[in-house]
Image (tube, rainbow, N blue to C red):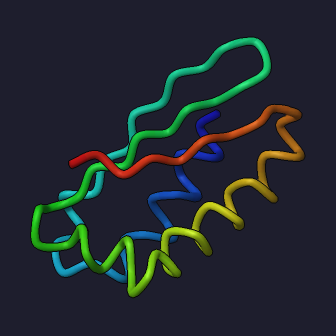
Amino acid sequence: MDRLQNLLVLLVRPIVDEPDRVEVEASESDMRVDLELRVAPDDIGKVIGRGGRTIRAIRTVVKAASVKVGKRVNVEVAD
C-alpha cells in the first residue's frame, strides 16, 4: 500500500504549483485499496485536467501498479 501511495505522490507533485501540500490518505480492505488525494485548492484543476484526462491517466498508472500488490485500487480527489 505504501508503494501505491508513494507512486501517486510521485505522479502528482510535478504537475502542481504547491507540491508540499500533496497528501494521500489510504484505507485498505481485503481486496481493495482506496487512495484519497488532497492538494491545494488552486491545484485541483491541474490534477483533474481538461475533461478529466490527467486524473484518468494517473488512475491508469496507479491501477497498473496495483497488479503487483494484488488488489484493486480506487483513486479519488478530495474537494
- Left or right: 50 as drawn, with respect to 4: left
Q: How many marks?
A: 0
- Left or right: 44 as drawn, with respect to 47: left
Image coords of residue 62 (percent x, y)? 67, 57
Give the image quarter of residue 32.
top right
Establish if 58 lies above or below 7. Answer: below
Image coords of residue 13 (percent x, y)? 36, 72
Image coords of residue 75 (percent x, y)? 53, 47
- Left or right: 71 as drawn, with respect to 28: right
The N terminus lies in quadrant: top right
Establish if 68 lies above or below 70. Answer: below
Farthest residue, direction bottom = 50
Of residues 12 and 46, the one nearer the viewer is 46
- Left or right: 8 as drawn, with respect to 23: right
Of residues 19 and 46, the one nearer the viewer is 46
Residue for point 68% across, 40% down:
73
Residue for point 28% across, 57% down:
22
Residue for point 37% across, 49% down:
37
Residue for point 42% across, 69% down:
12
Farthest residue, direction top = 30
